[in-house]
Structure formats: structure tokens, C-alpha cells
Image: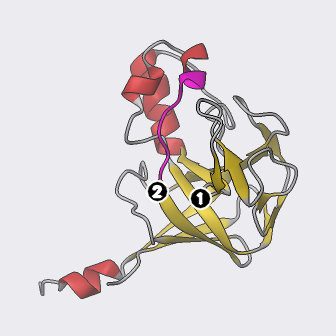
Amino acid sequence: MPTQTVKEQSSIKKLGLIVAVSLSQERGVPKYPQPEAQVGQYGLEGDCHAGPRYTNLRTGEEKDSRRHVTIVAQEALEEMNTALGISLLPGDLAENVLVRGLGDLSDVVAGDRLLLGDGVALEITGQNSPCSNLLRYHRRLAKNIYGKRGLIAKVVTTGRLRPGDPVELVRHSD
């Protein structure tokens, strides 16, 4: 079996699907699953994180948003439910998009892209750090989910998302 070069490996694609799309007008957890959501220039329309600027609640600092959309893997949610004996549901981790089939997303890096539904493109800007809001579900959740809390992304292409829509992870190439 031939081996792949690093360049060839960077173009490998992973396929999955959207389990849920969620939003909330208020910060914190949970966000609420919707039958569909419109992704605008700065995130899911009607979601509190949608916008060109983001204010850090701890410091009050306002800066350009790198977190138009948050993405969590169903696999990570299920792992936490099993490990901690809890029952996290879609939206409980304040994610906008819950996906299945891409693994726990811990290997996704800034610059990778997610292609969702019928043309929505998101560029990953980083891993999402667990926050103290998650402690309402279990005192060890934030610690246990570290590195698997999902992704933050900025919108490249707008469109509509629905549960059941396909998701494709495209690795950026150097």
C-alpha cells in the first residue's frame, strides 16, 4: 500500500452531518435547537454571538469576533454523558452547530474549513475553551471536556442550515 505525502494528507476530507442547529438571544447555556437557521455574515441570525465584535464578560474588553459560530461534536457530547453520568442535549454546550461523523474535533486547527448544508462555509479560528457556565451540568465537565469543547469559526459563505444537512471538513494546505 503506497504511503501518502504530507501534502496529500492535508487535503484529506472528512464527511459528517448536522445533528442540530441552536441559538439563543442570551449569553450562557443552553442554546435552543431550531428546525433551521440562517447563517449571516457574522453568525446565526438571532444568536447572541452573531456580530462583528465580541465583548469578554470577564474583562469587558471588546475585540473583533473570531467566534461567529461554535461547533461541537456529538461524539464529545456522548463521551461526557457516559464518563460523567449526565444527559447533555443539543445546545447544552452553547454550540450553534452539533455535528456527527467528524470525530471529537480535537484535531481540527485554525485555517481548516467546514462546508455545511447547501453552501455555508466556515473557517476555523481555533478550539473553543470550556467556561464556567458548563459547571451547571457537572462540577468536572469543564475539566473533562478540555480539548474537545469544539471549535470557533468565522463565516466565509452565508446560507441556511438544517439538521440532517451534510458537513465536510476540509483541511487547509500549506
The magenta span reads 127-134
Identify whether 157 is placed above or below 105: below
Residue at (74, 55) in percent of width and height: 163
Q: Position of residue 140 (x, y in %)?
A: 42, 16
- Mark with earlier residue (1, 2): 1
Say if residue 157 shows up in the picture. Answer: yes
- In x, y percent, where is residue 142? 45, 25
Determine whether the residue tagged by mark 1 lies in a helix, strand or loop: loop
Residue pointed to by mark 1 = 66
Residue 17 point in image, percent of width and height: 61, 60
Amino acid carrying mark 2 in the image: Gly
Q: Nearer the viewer, residue 73 or 61?
A: 61
Left or right: where does residue 157 sit relative to residue 137?
right
Residue at the far top: name it: 139
Give the side of residue 97 with respect to residue 15, left or right. Answer: right
Q: Which quadrant of the view contains residue 155?
A: bottom right
| Image quadrant where one finds the C terminus | bottom left
The answer to which quarter of the image holds residue 111 is bottom left
